[in-house]
Image: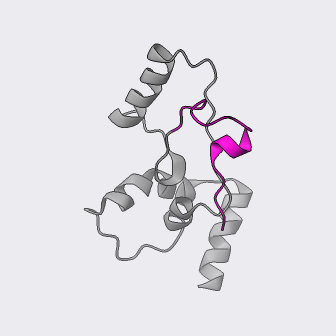
Amino acid sequence: MIRVGEQVIFSAEPGTLFTTGNVANQFHEHDLNSKAVLAYAVNVLHVKHVIVMGHYGCGGVAAATQAHNAIDEDDPVQAWIAPIRHIYETSERYVVVFLGILHVWCA
């Protein structure tokens, strides 16, 4: 998979976009880093538009939807993607349920 930078997607000159990212592109309300980045962008840089972007084939989301019989609870990546796993495991949306059935059937 080829990753394309935000500047390319928006045809922006270098330095004209303020960007940040993390595994699975999540924003947790208790994550101090995400809150600090957003506060800095809005309060200091006076950013008027905030765009949250993801991409197809996200490895963080894929990891959250895989079987996890032997998850190390102390693993920071597993802890970070746990909210996605919870949504995946408890969702009643047809598409998400179907994806879960496919994972079990194809395993």
Which corner quadrant of the image does residue 16 belong to? top right
The residue positioned 62% from the left and 69% from the top of the image is: 100
Q: Nearer the viewer, residue 69 or 49?
A: 49
Whether residue 45 sits left or right of residue 92 in the image: it is left
Q: Measuring from the top left, give residue 31's x and y in whole percent.
A: 36, 37
Quadrant of the image occupied by residue 53: top right
Whole-percent x, y for residue 72 in the image: 29, 69
Q: Position of residue 49 (x, y in %)?
A: 64, 23
The image shows residue 2, relative to residue 40, as above or below, that is: below
Magenta-drawn stretch contains 16:
yes
Q: Nearer the viewer, residue 87 or 16?
A: 16
Q: In the image, is residue 51 above or below residue 57?
A: above
Where does the magenta region start and end? 1-19
- At 53% across and 60% down in the image, what residue appears? 89
Would you say residue 92 sits in the magenta stretch? no
Quadrant including the N terminus: bottom right
- Decide if residue 41 is on the left or right side of residue 48: left
Q: Is residue 31 visible?
A: no
**In percent of the image, x 56 and y 33: which residue is there?**
15
Q: Is residue 42 above or below residue 52?
A: above
Q: Depth check: 10 or 62 in front?
A: 10
- Can residue 61 be seen here? The reply is yes
Q: For the stretch drawn in magenta, what is the main secondary structure?
A: loop
Q: Position of residue 63 (x, y in %)?
A: 50, 67
Residue 106 appears left or right of 10: left
**Residue 107: quadrant of the picture:** bottom right
Residue 6, placed above or below residue 75: above
Residue closest to the far bottom: 107
